[in-house]
Amino acid sequence: MKFFTLPFTPTSADIDELGHVNNAVWVRWIQDMATAHWNALADRAHIAAYIWVVTRHEIDYRGNIGLGEQVIGRTWISDPPKGAQFDRNVEFLDARGKAIVRAKTRWAMIDKASGRLVRVPADLTAIFLA
């Protein structure tokens, strides 16, 4: 599996009234990680031609962190796409290495020029799969 990782540290704007990261922030971090993964691995031609949109989020919250605590987000693609869509796996690991948030998100590829869904090209698939 090809893991892509990024560290995240919440600011005061990310903390809710319970004193930990707001659920909406976890969703934003999922999107930030997916975008960074795409920009790190895809070539410039693919980035110029395509854009991704989320069609589904499935998230399990099993823990949380507070202000200034860091998590390591990691994401990977475990299965080939189905037409224009594929599933992305995401985990956020706390300082002990425990997964405190896990998600499976479904993304669809859109051709920027036409605005229509497009099948994920095989050469692009190979970059993201192990």
Image: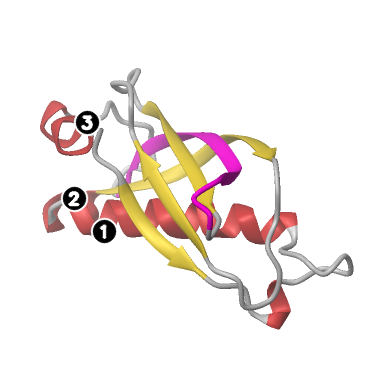
Q: Where is residue 13 in the image (x, y as percent from the top left)?
A: 71, 79
Quadrant (top left/top right/bottom left/bottom right) for the C terminus: top left
Check disc 3 and report the residue beneath it: 129
Report the colour scheme. Answer: secondary structure
Which of 23/94 is in front?
94
**On the picture, is 67 further left or further right than 107?**
right
Give the main secondary structure, helix, strand or loop, of the magenta stretch.
strand
Name the secondary structure under disc 1. Answer: helix
Amino acid tagged 1: Asn
Farthest-out residue, front: 96
Q: Distance between the residues labelled 1 and 3?
A: 15 Å
Q: Residue at the far bottom: name it.
A: 12
Q: Which of 101 and 96 is in front in this view?
A: 96
Circle nearer the N terminus (1, 3): 1
Residue corresponding to mark 2: 42
Give the image location of residue 4, x and y in percent.
31, 50
Asked if 38 appears above or below 32 in the picture, the reply is above
Residue lying at 30% horizontally and 44% vertically, measured from the top left: 3
User: Could you tell me which secondary element the residue under label 2 belongs to?
Assistant: loop
- Magenta region, residue range: 96-112
Proximity of marks 2 and 3: CB atoms separated by less than 8 Å = no
Residue lying at 18% horizontally and 48% vertically, measured from the top left: 46
- N-terminal label among 2 and 3: 2
At x 31%, y 53%, the residue is 37
Disc number for residue 39: 1
Using the rendered view, name the quadrant where residue 23 is placed: bottom right
> Disc 3 residue type?
Leu
